[in-house]
Amino acid sequence: MSSLPDLLARIQAYTEAHPFPAEPPGLYEPCGYMLDLGGKRLRPALALMAYELFGNDVDAALPVAWAVELFHNFSLMHDDIMDAAPLRRGKPTVHTQWNTTTAILSGDALLIQAYKHLAAFADEPVIPKLLDAFNRVAIGVCEGQQLDLNFETRTDVGVDEYLQMIELKTAVLLGGALEMGALCARASSEDAAALYQFGCLAGIAFQIQDDLLDTYGDPAKFGKQVGGDIVQNKKTLLVLKTMETASAADQAELEHWLGSTADDADAKIAAVRTLFDRNGIPERIADEKEQFRQLAFDRLDAVSAPEDRKRALRDVVSALLDREH
């Protein structure tokens, strides 16, 4: 089983061997900028790790792994527009660095490039299965984003609805990366499905950790505006758990802040964070994350691959769920 640094080096070498076209620069320079912002590239690495559970020539899966990363960055580029986010990974977002029109078009180009690399997988009989998985994941991400947008104007969002949304918006891509890596190695449908479920459950835990970091993270490490979800009145798990468990007075105060467009964003963030702290919400959310972590690892246990190879995957995902940025 290759180490994570080795897999990341292989991914980097593949990207350097397959650069974006030079012309027109107005379309492709933002693509290169987005890919150079310093993302962890864990999704393509997970695809390669899934391949190595069953196969040995991991380089064969690089086109598929890179397709996953291109799609991920396409979704982030458009997500930043919808969220009006000024920063991505500590640097200006594409629509801030250029403009919204450029970010839309360059994001579209990333998506099309993803299909180009996916179709380049050498084992042609497997490509239809890869396309089926990729398309299912891609439309799930779009559905999750729409649900997230819907929640911004609803006051009756439940915890179960939220978990469904983050499964679609975030988790299915982690699951899909693992599933597609397994498919590249011609793993059984049962093992590919178990890896998909493992990735989805781990992805929910990942997003829960992201919610915590958005409110409680170190800005120097997080790379985005801490408290951005609060400023945008997002119905995160922290908010929903507060509305589910807090006193009527605290619920009313939270509703007040979520309905406000306070000029002083720092004051709003501090007030909402105080409400979370008073109701023990960070601890409740951390417990929720641990439950999904255990469910995920139960699905990994069901995969019929060597235990030492699964252990490497388990270690990487554990580090992902305990990250500080």
Image: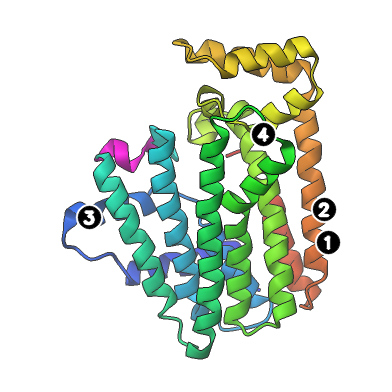
Describe residue 281's horizontal placement relative to residue 38 as left or right. right
Distance Cα–Cα, label 3 vs label 1: 44 Å
Q: Depth-wise, is mark 4 or mark 3 nearer the camera?
A: 4
Which residue does the numbered mark 1 point to in the structure image? 298
Mark 3 crowd level (few <14, some 14–19, many ≥20, 10 Å Cα): many
Q: N-terminal of the two: label 2 or label 3? A: 3
- Name the N-terminal-most of marks 4 and 1: 4
Looking at the rendered structure, the secondary structure element under dot 3 is helix
Looking at numbered disc 4 in the image, what kind of residue is underneath it?
Val
User: Is there a contact, CB below 8 Å, between mark 2 and mark 1?
Assistant: yes
The amino acid marked with disc number 1 is: Asp
Residue 254, quarter of picture: top right
Q: Is 255 drawn above or below residue 285 in the view shown?
A: above
Which SS class for mark 2? Answer: helix
- Tell me the CA gap for discs 2 and 3: 43 Å
* Residue 100's disc number: none
Say if 166 sits above or below 24 in the image: above
Residue at 16% over, 62% down? 23
Boundaries of the magenta span: 90-98
Of residues 122 and 12, the one nearer the viewer is 122
User: For this view, does 44 lie left or right of residue 240?
Assistant: left
Please name the residue that numbered disc 2 is placed on.
294
Q: Secondary structure at mark 1?
A: helix
Question: Crowding at label 4, few (<14), some or many (≥20) Cα neighbours within 10 Å?
Answer: some
